[in-house]
Amino acid sequence: MDRLRDLAATSAVLERAKGALMALTGSSPDAAHEELVARAETGHRTLIEECWLTLGALMPPLEPNAGGGDLADAAAEAGSGRPAATAPQDAGASRATGGTPWEATATGTQADADALARLGKALLRVGSPRELADCLLAHIGPEVGADAVMFYERRPDGGLELVGHSGIDETLAAQWRQVPPLSGVTPLEVLEAQEPRWLEDFTADRRRHLLIGNPPERWRSRAWLPVPTGDRSTLAFGVLRRCEGRFTPRERILLRAAARLCAGRLRAFDAVQDVTPGALPTAVQAMFDALPGATVLLAPLRGASGEVEDYRIDAATPEAVDVLGRSGRELVGLRILECYPSVAGEPLWQGYLDALIGSEPYEGEPFAYQEDVAGVPRTATYSVRATRLGEGLLVTWIRHDPSDRQEQRLADVQRLGNLGWANWNLATDEVTWSSQAYALLDRDPARGPVRLDQLPDLALPADAPALSRAIAQLVREGRPFDVPFRTASGPGVRHLRAVAEAVADADGTPVEVHGFVQDLTAQRSAELALVESERAILLQRGVLQAERAMATRLQHALLPLPSKPIRLAGLRVEVAYLPAQSEIHVGGDWFSAVELPDESALFVVGDVAGHGIDAVATMAQLRFTAKGMVSTGSSLTGALARLNSLLLHSRDSNTTATLILARYDPRAHRLEWAQAGHLAPLLLRRGEVRYLDRPDGMLLGATASPVFESAACVLEPGDRLLLYTDGLVERPGEGLDGGLARLAEAAVGHDADGPGSLEALLAAMLEGERRDDVCVVDIRMPEAAE
């Protein structure tokens, strides 16, 4: 419907313009059409643009339609193909012009036609996309409630470039000047579909589109339309409104008409505006013919976006030569990129732009250039100076002789080496400093240099005596010196180094001193920072070593390890504890295997989170508390609940731990056990292995109301039960299931019943450096014959 309505409106405007010409000139319809086409080509405008200009200039104001109606009705009639309703007095005019949507409306229609006619006239004076945006906002903005206007052009890479805007600040324009080809960008969607987009519901549009604005809420409704500049539009025109609500049919028609009016103007910007080479007065080139050196006068050539694309040479001196050997007047009228194609994208090109935009001239760095002198190639050094002159640039190529090059090299050495030279003539008291020496010594050049004996006055009081002694020995004995000293400068203290030697006369008396001053602040700061870092590292290392030693001694004292298997309640029990091999980590793994007063046995294996003294202290607290509670009659689940409360109310309430409590009754051969977030025991029976099913239980210290349950297992003669911590089965890069599978396989392969069998199992399981402690309790039920 939008396309049909657009086509109907376009055809109606064309027929009306033809009818106007026919009425004034008496020509035929074909002749009127050819006249409109000729005028459009002459004025570099589109046909529809020429039609609006013709209507605005030739048509008298229409009388209000006595029949009333509004633009929405007219647009609907135009879109549906029905003839527009006209008053009787306008019937003849309607037939003459073919009937247009504008005739079907009341006074507002004539106002819209007048607004478009004024816009068409104003566009003739527009010279850039930025001026075009200003013109649109001024003439169409009040009619559609627009607060800002933007023009985007599609780049070859698929993105967008902002070529014109009005009503938005420069900061926002800079942020949205280059838009990559992202999804949700409305101007891109418009150019892809070649159809307008009407964004009239801000809440919904914000979810679907990437809205321009900082913040986007500044504009509550928007419209984007393609500008028909060719077979497929590459330009999108947008209006942004602070008001909410839909665009009325009248506003949509106005915006479509405005987009068509802009098309011809934008096409006129596509070609770089050029001027004939002879446009400048001949006196200018005559003056350049008499100038020495290589100098050219450049005129900027701008593209459709208003940016400089090239420069035209309007005048040149005889010594100005391009890469092809053309010189002087031969260069006039040529482009810079024709004569010197290598400058594109170089700092020199950006220097031209900076000089053209700003008020300061551009001074380029010296560079080497090979030239032919009498057929012999010779390398010369040049620098470029560009100065703005009116709307153009005056560019001079300055050649440096060998002495200039030497001075430039010396200045570069001082700048790069952060040093400055100084000369003191002891006979005449003449003193000369380089500009870098003034900068390093933080002295105003207007005050002049200081004498050699006054140099210590510039140093800090603590360093002045050493510098004074070195200068005295240099003057009396001619002994050179190399002395570090400090000065007070604006940013703080500056570390300097003074080096000097004397030149003596025939009698050996020093008459002149040559020296330099070097800034060592960065080097000295790095040295001091390194020393401070080394000191901090040594201190931290000592603290860690002391903490580890204390934790190790405490752990050994609290967790005695039996040297051989022990007998408890008819079971043979072997215990292994292997600390982590890290130099700084002491873990909280622990075990307990004791016989209780009722001749039953208690087995405990636990792991406290963390390392160091705190972990060892928490381990000791849990170990002794668990043994005491079970010994006094507490159930296993009750003991776990009380241990959980103990951790929650400890000094470090963030500590957690895993634990297994197991109680063996020798009379019933029954092992009852409970766990708190710990790995299940491994049972080996008659050559087969399985992990016991874990009862419910959460790790200690995790919640104030945990649920703990117990389970039971009857041990048979020859059974082997392993309680262990996670350090036994964890390996970097391997999942926990893989570690448990390795343990089951190793237990089957190392099931020998005798001293040292646990060592073989550990050797098979542990490879490389251990990052965590390993604790294992190996419980065996003797064979019936034993």
Image: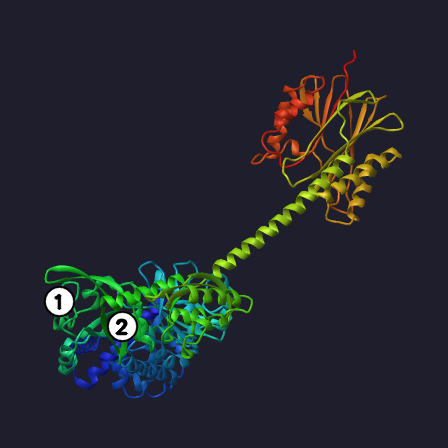
> Quadrant location of the N terminus?
bottom left
The residue tagged 1 is: 326
Q: Is residue 80 above or below residue 555?
A: below
Is label 2 in a helix, a strand or a loop? Answer: strand
Q: Is residue 95 something that shows in the picture?
A: no
Q: In 3D space, how far apart are the residues under numbered discs 2 and 1 (Cα atoms)?
A: 21 Å
- Residue lying at 30% horizontally and 66% vertically, measured from the top left: 408
State the residue in front, 454 or 731: 454
Q: Residue furthest left?
A: 374
Amino acid under disc 1: Arg
Q: Earlier in the sequence, mark 2 or mark 1?
A: 1
Which residue type does callout 2 highlight? Arg
Classify residue 87 by image quadrant: bottom left
Q: Quadrant of residue 319?
A: bottom left
In this rendering, position of residue 119 left or right of residue 653: left
Whether residue 138 is visible to the viewer of this picture, yes or no, is yes
Q: Is residue 523 above or below residue 292?
A: above
